[in-house]
Amino acid sequence: MMINPVLLKEIKVKMRSWKAVGIIGGYLLILAAVALFITYANASDMYSSTINPQFSIGAYTGIAIIQFILILFIAPALTAGAIAGERERQTLDLILCTKLAPRSIILGKLLASMSHILILIIASIPMFSIVFLYGGISVVEIAQLFGFYIVTAIMAGSIGIFFSTYVKKTIAATVLTYALGIFMCFGTLFIAVFYIRIFYNYNYQSYFPLFYINPLAGFSSLLTEQFGGQYGGILNMIPGLYMVNPLNVKGTAPWLINTYVNIGISVVMLFLAAIKINPTRRGIFFFLKRK
Amino acid sequence: MLEIKNLHKRYGKFYAVNGLDLSIPEGEIFGFVGPNGAGKSTTMKIICGLLTATSGEITVDGVDALRHNNKIKEDIGYMPDFFGVYDDLKVDEYLDFYASVYKVKDANKNKMITDLLELVDLGNKRDAYVDNLSRGMKQRLCLARSLIHNPKLLILDEPASGLDPRARVEMKAILRNLKDMGKTILISSHILSELAEMCTSIGIIDNGKIVISGTVTEIMQQIYSKKLIKIKVNDKLEEAVTILKEFPFIDKITTGENQIQAAFDGGEEDMSRVLYSLVTRSIPVATFAQLDGNLEDVFMKVTKGGEEQ
């Protein structure tokens, strides 16, 4: 099987640079700091001779949240310059005039960035081992969490690639990617709150549909379900983010729908990027123009 | 090898290429000359599938390049007028990447890279980072990259631009080697004299169309209906001019310091008669030569004509 040459080259170039070492180092430092802080806070409770399951859940939640935020920040940064950077280095034409299909170029770029994210996730596994010391969290739950990370990273990365193909400069593509990311995380939240206030007077006992594109909402739903709806906490005060008890949400769990929606968004973004990058493209609706 | 018929490329109301016709037989080095913005790079990009044509036909080795662009990609090696490089790749890794992209078999890859680096005289830079190479070296590496899949047709967009005189000479030597290897080459420049000495034929493009094409001699003959002769004498300048005026096929005589330039509309026998007359009548002739004509004048004359249209 031939491995995508763009992926191979990207991994070689990315992993060779100090930037990669810096990202992995900084990432692990932040996670280690969080894990140490939580462990220290628990150890300081020296009068307690029993193992407190709250600690394991607190440590898991703390590390998971920090890791999720870091991934949301890092994934777009890794991909927003993928195509725009090639354009700036004047190497894009050199690849486009080869036999490599535009979709292979796009996928190679995405997979290279995702491999970077994967390294970060794998490198963080020892941090999660602290949680296993105290029990209360299963391997399946960790696998669910990592799966959600990867799908969210692919979605954020695909948005980065999309803007990278449609905008000429890396900086502009990065700004637009983060702007859309902020809208998905917080813009949808504001829209939901105002919409529910105006049309439902806060009496909205379901998961607001716009939250299916909100990675934070999906992530909250995942954690809430993993803890049996016990730790919805402050999130339950947000109208439309109805996850106090997952049993109230009929059918598929919201975070799972978020996952499907993320996959859908990724496919659409990558498809549009592959069309845009093709210099001899006939447009998205070329088949309608056929005589 | 390459046939272009009535090619058009329009951006809004502006035609970057406007009815361009071109034919390059196999094994030729065709010089594509024109001022900046004449449509050279646009035409080259259309051939390589980096731009779509508004209308027209292009065939490469008999294959319709506009409809079946993917089929002809392995037959074309393209070198743009800029050199795109990756910061953190070594010279052999750079070539290895493009070899993989062109699906060169692993068994042939290493030998191909070695041979190409020898061809472009970068054999000793194999482990150097691309970013640390000089401009001339990068340019040669780009040429090697365009050859990595052994294409039949090479499209080189101003390969010598920005190079110092030594690097230009080296680049020309490499291109001559490629010609000997049987490659068909389409090479562009905005300097006619740069291409004249290495190309088998030349086409001058202006305002998106070829205004004149052929060998350098043919072009000169089309532009100048008469040849130019230049005579240098050590003495008796006035007497020499008087003798020249006796011949009906010589006119437009101009003189400088001990030298005469004149338009000549005769054959080789007439030329020897003129020289014989000068020598037998004791004119101390130092040099007697037919001028090739000024290539830059040709370029200016042809491209100016285009502008007037």
Image (spheres, helix red, strand yellow):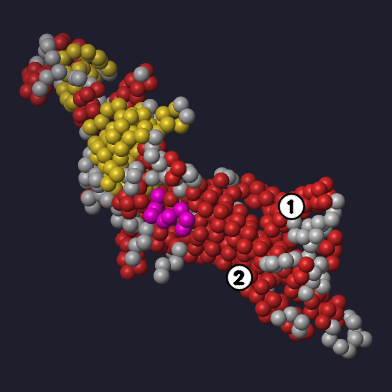
> Residue, x 63% and y 74% (percent of image)?
A122
Q: In the rendered image, is residue B31 in sight?
A: no
Q: Is residue A290 magenta?
A: no
Q: Residues within 10 Å of mark 2 (few under 14, many from 20)?
A: few
Three-letter amino acid code of the residue under disc 1: Thr
> Residue, x 82% and y 62% (percent of image)?
A235
Lateral position of residue A143 relative to residue B74, left or right:
right
Three-letter amino acid code of the residue under disc 2: Ile
Pointer 2 residue: A119
| Pointer 1 with pointer 2, Cβ within 8 A | no
Q: For this rendering, which residue is in front, A47 or A258?
A: A258
Task: Please tell me which of labels 1 and 2 falls first in the chain.
Answer: 2
Q: Residues within 10 Å of mark 1 (few under 14, many from 20)?
A: many
Chain letter of the residue carrying label 2:
A
Q: Which residues are magenta?
A: A97-104
Pointer 1 residue: A188
Lateral position of residue A179 relative to residue B161, left or right:
right
* Quadrant of the rendered image containing residue A25: bottom right
Q: Secondary structure at mark 2?
A: helix
Q: Position of residue B41 (x, y in %)?
A: 40, 38
Q: Position of residue B30 (x, y in %)?
A: 27, 39
Residue with the most extreme bottom position? A49
Q: Secondary structure at mark 1?
A: helix
Q: Position of residue A48 (x, y in %)?
A: 90, 86
Looking at the rendered image, the disc whose residue lies closer to the viewer, 1 or 2, is: 1
Lateral position of residue B160 relative to residue A275, left or right:
left
> Residue, x 46% and y 53% (percent of image)?
A102
Q: For this rendering, which residue is in front, A40 or B222?
A: A40
Chain letter of the residue carrying label 1:
A
